[in-house]
Image: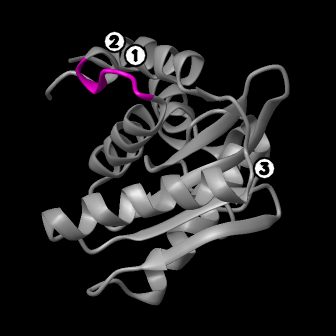
Amino acid sequence: MGLNEDQERLALQERELRLPRLDARVAWELGVRLRTMAEERGLAVVIDVRRFEQPLFYAALEGTTPDNAEWVRRKSNVVARFHLSSYAVGLKLETKNETLAGQQGLPLADYATHGGSFPLAVEGAGVLGSVTVSGLPQRADHELVVEALCGLLRRDYAELRLASE
């Protein structure tokens, strides 16, 4: 699957995966769902669910490092800034052969356009937070988040997932 097809699918995911609300209970349910999925699959990931500037759920599974927490922070900053998934921003820049540092003057120490952070949009309110995973290759980080959101929202993951590489 090419970059354009992935970008179209990412836009569809972001349009379709909207929450009815974002509160501590929803964040907990999403975080626990992600943690359970990761544990069942033996994945070493860090999971972060937040309203911007307010952590609501955080878990670091066995095998992760402090570097994973840094990746979470940097990817989440991209979502907070652009209200798009970190993977979508990264692919958009890649197609233009640009970087955030070059295009926006944003420091790489604070922003990472690698997959794994997804906007938490609420119907009628817009993007209020993010859910982020770090520890896998970027596409797998992204897809783990999308799969968990599909489960939470009772959506068919097969209809929204990225096509196989």
Q: Position of residue 35 (x, y in %)?
A: 36, 66
Q: Earlier in the sequence, mark 1 or mark 3?
A: 1
Amino acid type at image mark 2? Glu
Q: How many marks?
A: 3
Look at 48% across and 30% down and name the residue there. 153
State if disc 1 and disc 2 touch (CB < 8 Å).
yes
* Residue 145 appears in the rendering: yes
Amino acid type at image mark 1? Arg
Secondary structure beneath label 3: loop
Q: In this rendering, would 140 be left or right of 150?
A: left
Which residue in the protein does label 3 denote? 105
- Seen as rendered, the residue at the extreme front is 25
Label 2 Cα crowd, 10 Å radius (few <14 / some 14-19 / many 20+): few
* Residue 136 appears in the rendering: no
State if disc 3 and disc 2 touch (CB < 8 Å).
no
| Quadrant housing residue 111 | bottom right
Secondary structure beneath label 2: helix
Q: Position of residue 142 (x, y in %)?
A: 39, 44
Query: What residue span does the magenta drawing correspond to?
Result: 154-158
Q: Which mark is residue 155?
A: none
The quadrant of the rendering that contains the N terminus is: top left
Q: Which mark is residue 5?
A: 2
